[in-house]
Image: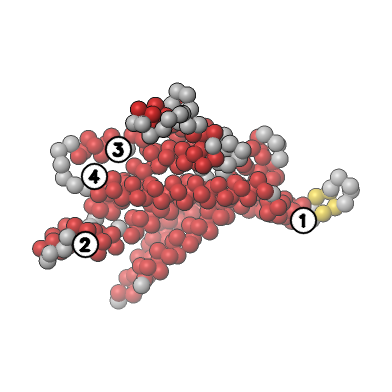
Amino acid sequence: MTGSLARRARHERVLLLLPVVLLLALVVGVPALRVVLLGFTRTELADGVVSSWAGLATHARTFADGRFLSALRNTAVFTSLSVSLEVTLGMALALLLDRSFRGRGALRAVVLVPWALPTSVMALAWAWIFHDTFGMANDLLSRLGLIEAPVAWLARPATAMAALVVADAWKTTPFVALILLAGLQAVPSEVLEAARVDGAGSWQRFRRITLPLLVPSLVVATLFRSIQAWGAFDIVYVMTGGGPGGSTETLSLYAFQSWFRYLDFGYGAAIAVQGMLVALLLAAVVVKLASRRETA
């Protein structure tokens, strides 16, 4: 009886998700499939030789392209650093907002302001904050005596990537906190109170009760933010433009440059499709690990 109810619940979830899946297949899947299938079309090359593998050669070209590999590495670094920071800060913020105190509602509303701002506007503001001459970051650090000379944050590879991560975390940490706060609201207060009566401290209650019950929310937040960070474009384009020396160029920015700057449409499409495939692979791994933990 229990097994049939579980199967019925799974079928209902699939039916509810079916319209979204069909929409994504139409908007994303069909164009991506068209780009991939271009590899099997017959294309006449400049020397008159007809090749049926021109499109596949375009995809294979990425593996010998040092700029593509650098963009892939930059995207992976940006995604891992920003998502890790956002989940950590989001957890702390969610625990704070879950407490009862005067003005909690107003604070919850204020916290969401960075997330509501357009990314391009926010990125422009952070670019000015990290400006080496007029930026507030250098001024504040100088007043605190932490630096003796202005730091060119956006002109050095390491500091430019760090600036992007800080700006992205400032904007999207409220999104993670909102998801985790919803998960915290679902934790039964009776269980926490019983653990407190049994002598469990705050850390023990969090580690043994709250955190395990928050795993589904953590998976959702990590999955959403990983996909969004992997496709980061506007924040990089506005703050650094991929510089200095391509040290912050992401796959999305490289695909954009190939399309609109170099007019290499086929190669730009190949970069975008391969970036999408890697994102889907990462999402599949996260979902698989989460499902294994639920069935364990």
* Corner quadrant of residue 193: bottom left
Mark 1 falls on what kind of element?
loop
Mark 4 falls on what kind of element?
helix
Q: Residue at x 22, y 48 (%)?
A: 98
How far apart marks 4 and 3 lie (CA) works out to 10 Å
Q: Residue 97's mark?
A: 4
Which numbered disc, 1 or 2, marks the residue that appears first in the sequence? 1
Q: Quadrant of the C terminus?
A: bottom left
Would you place residue 124 above or below residue 62 in this image?
Answer: above
How far apart marks 1 and 2 lie (CA) works out to 60 Å
Q: Nearer the viewer, mark 1 or mark 2?
A: 2
- Label 1 sits on residue: 53
Q: Residue 111's mark?
A: 3
* Corner quadrant of residue 156: top right
> 131 or 142, which is in the foreground?
142
Q: Residue furthest bottom?
A: 1
Q: Position of residue 212 (x, y in %)?
A: 29, 62
Instruction: Report if the CB atoms under discs 4 and 3 are less than 8 Å apart.
Output: yes
Q: Amino acid at mark 4?
A: Leu
Q: Nearer the viewer, mark 3 or mark 2?
A: 2
Instruction: Report if the CB atoms under discs 3 and 2 are less than 8 Å apart.
Output: no
Would you place residue 180 above or below residue 141 in this image?
Answer: below
Q: Residue 204's mark?
A: 2
Residue density around tag 1, few if under 14, some if 14–19, many if 20 or more, within 10 Å:
some
Which numbered disc, 4 or 3, marks the residue that appears first in the sequence? 4
Instruction: Report if the CB atoms under discs 1 and 2 are less than 8 Å apart.
Output: no
